[in-house]
Image (cartoon, grey):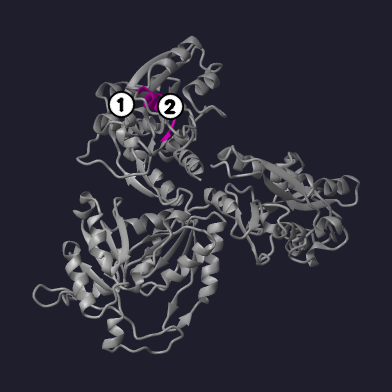
Amino acid sequence: MTDSWKVFRAGTRSSPLALRQTAHVIKHISKLLPMADFETVQIDTPGDLDRETDLRSSPPDFFSRTLDAALLEERIDLAVHSAKDLPEPLPEGLDWFWLPAAGDRRDALVGSLAPRLIGVSSQRRAEYAARRFPDAELKPLRGNIGERLQQLDEGRFDLLIMAGVALQRLGLEQRITEWIPLKELDTPEGQGALAVTFRRGDPRMQAIRKLFIKTPVFAGAGVGEGQLTLDAMRALRNAEVCLYDALMDDAVLLHLSAGAKRIYVGKRQGEHSRPQEEINRMLCDFVRKGYRTVRLKGGDPGIFGRLAEEIEALEVLGLPARVIPGISAMQTAAAGSGVLLTRRGVSRGFTVMTPRLQGGATGAVDAAARAELPIVFYMAVTKAGQVAAELMEDGLSGNTPCVLVFAAGADNEAVYRCPLDALEATLGTIPDRQRKLPGLLIVGEIACYGFDAALGALGGRRVLLTCSEALMERCVQSVYDLGARPVQRPLIRLQILPQAADIVRHMADFDWIALTSPSAVRCLHEVILCERLDMRSMPRIMTTGPGSVRALEKAGLGCELVPEADFSSAGLLAAAAGQVKGQKVLRLRSARAGADLAEGLRTAGADVTDCVLYENCDITYSEQPEFDAVFFASASAVASFVRQWQTDILTGKMILAMGGPTADELQVHGVKAHVAIGAGTVEENLLALAAACL
């Protein structure tokens, strides 16, 4: 974060709930961007000043109109709202996003369940009350949360229907009589979520938004479930929302999780389920709401799939995108039928086009029209100068755009652009290591276009991930969410020690098992499975934080003790000290973890068996990776990195260290991490790296 970032003026309504919510948003942003300063500006809205209008008939911007005006007049820089209060669409010139980790969406009953008079503030609540309590009278309810409760306490109402999350945020959850299940009373999607609005195009707020959204994915579905790529399959499995076209095989959708939203937006033979403008809007809205969104297209998304239009809609708002190519119908038809598009001695290439024009008209397909199409050259890098000369001799302008793409799709992909007459000179500036990679040459007007990879929070950087393979999938997903390219180079593998397995076989003899990392959890689970141990005889488990707890849950194991805040061995010791006296504890750890926790537990009165469960073994590579930032998840990974590549290649790179021991190991080698948050999940660590890169 640079010094050019100044004080942010945060607009809010003046109710206690609005002020509490604004403070929460400011705290959330300040945690990631501690250099930012915030000033709270209280602004009354029409809904605050008019206490008589029934909310069932109030205008959509009743609680946002004056905040919107303050933004457009540049009196504030952002405004905080309950997401359900935002009108749709927002006034021209405004943009928005939701914060993650929304609260409980359910409504709640407050008061007597045998009411005569019920206060309601929306039509859906009124309809529910009429069904649930047919003999009760319904009257409009106005005022902030405290004022509504006061009306209940004064006997003006017997029962209120309120947003449960509002009571929770004000510390008034004890006033709830009964939570209403969503299946009985559904609520607006935005209930429980907090929204931030700002002036469209404000670069500071767009940069902040990058930390709270996930980069959407455009994925090719191929022509059938069997031709779905692994990358597309992973994207679908992790998706929260999927906007999908007409597919050749709907079985592709089975890879979505049960909770993912599935929305059909396809087109067939000119029949459009939705206008393209609506698809663009839906896509942008889901991204701004923080959903991990997949836009699934048949075949390959880049071939007649309107990919450019949809990505341009995102880029206009400063939102990133990632594309996963697919197997196209063209490829399938050619390779599957034997009508190969290239055949030695017969065909050196092919032209792909459609006779359909925008709007449904028919375009020419004659020689002149074909001559305007871009040309793709395989295996032409070493002959690029000769190719350029022949094309210009044949009448092609020297200003015709060209692009050279090396190692397309790989983590070391490199792209170079130039006009046709500068092609040979440009080739001479490309490093030898890249010129030796497989390369494509594309010539034509289309070569001047490209996707803006810098729109994500990590700005399209290559992030070297050195963590174990067990953590890699989560790291990769987080890097993609933050708009960067993962460079996967796990540097250590975990090897379980035979003597440790002997001890784990007798785990039923212990009262507790102490674990301090997800890796230790996974190794324990592997021993349990390999030895076919009865998990019903598991002792209670203590561990250090959310990452280990998730690993335990994935393994079907519970956790009885975890620190509330300090997710370190010291934090675990502090939490456990009063509970382990006279207890038998099995401490399972890596060979590098040290015996401090075991000694601390003994001092607290426990009978401790300190067992080295696994050791870290190096994974080596023949070549150095190319990267802009590096994530070290353990001290072992640091040591392995230094043994292979020394520290010189870290010069000029952003360095992230997860946990104190990892940062300490870097210091041993004379390297200081730019970001080291001490503990937390891999997602929290990578988010901190993204914040440091803004």
The residue to which callout 2 is attached is: 516
Residue 4's spot in the image, x, y percent? 58, 45
Would residue 349 be visible to someone looking at this image? Answer: yes
Q: Secondary structure at mark 1?
A: strand
Residue 236's spot in the image, x, y percent? 41, 58
Foreground: 684 or 663? 663
Whole-number angstrom distance, CA of label 1 to CA of label 2: 13 Å
What label does residue 614 carry, if any?
1
**Disc 1 packing (10 Å; few <14; some 14–19; many ≥20):** many
Q: Is residue 665 left or right of residue 404?
A: right
Q: Where 469 falls versus 585 (above or below)? A: below
Is 357 magenta? The answer is no
Residue segment shown in magenta:
656-668
What label does residue 647 carry, if any?
none
Q: Is residue 466 left or right of residue 435?
A: right
Q: Where 529 falls versus 373 (above or below)? A: above
Q: What residue is shown at x 54% (from left), y 27% (from top)? A: 566
Q: What residue is shown at x 59% (from left), y 37% (from top)? A: 34
Q: Label the magenta part by its dominant secondary structure.
A: helix
Labels 1 and 2: the sequence-earlier one: 2
Residue 87 quadrant:
bottom right
Q: Secondary structure at mark 2?
A: loop
